[in-house]
Amino acid sequence: MLFFGTGLPGDRWHAAEERVKIEALRLGVRTLACFLGELASEPALRGAARGRGMSP
């Protein structure tokens, strides 16, 4: 499991006065997209994605 936090401490998510800056969410999406792209290019993980298990 992987969690990417995109908020800032001052956002107070889930509080009565919560807020979020859209730019922070956009940058979070870009970060996750780059990370997943890098992860997908890992040779040891490509076989696992096809259901063949991880290669040594």
Image (spheres, helix red, strand yellow):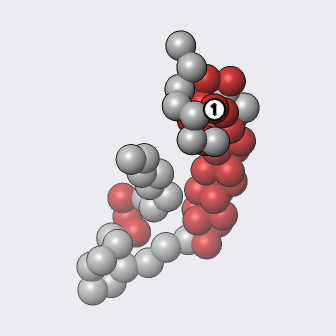
Residue 14 rendering spot, x and y as whole percentages: 30, 77
Residue 27 rendering spot, x and y as whole percentages: 65, 56
Residue at far left of view: 15
Element at label 1: helix
Residue placed at 61% from the left, 72% from the top? 22
Vertical comparison of 10 with 16: above or below:
above
| Res 31 seen here | no
| Res 44 seen here | yes
Residue at far front of view: 52
| Residue named by callout 1 | 47
Residue at far bottom of view: 16
Residue placed at 39% from the left, 47% from the top? 1
Vertical comparison of 10 with 3: above or below:
below
The residue closer to the viewer here, 21 or 1, is 1
Residue 24 rendering spot, x and y as whole percentages: 58, 62
Residue placed at 59% from the left, 56% from the top? 28
- Indicate the quadrant where residue 10 lies: bottom left
Vertical comparison of 20 with 47: above or below:
below
> As drawn, is 14 to the left or to the right of 48?
left
The residue closer to the viewer here, 33 or 28, is 33
Badge 1 amino acid: Gly
> As drawn, is 17 to the left or to the right of 22?
left
Vertical comparison of 46 with 31: above or below:
above
The residue closer to the viewer here, 44 or 15, is 44
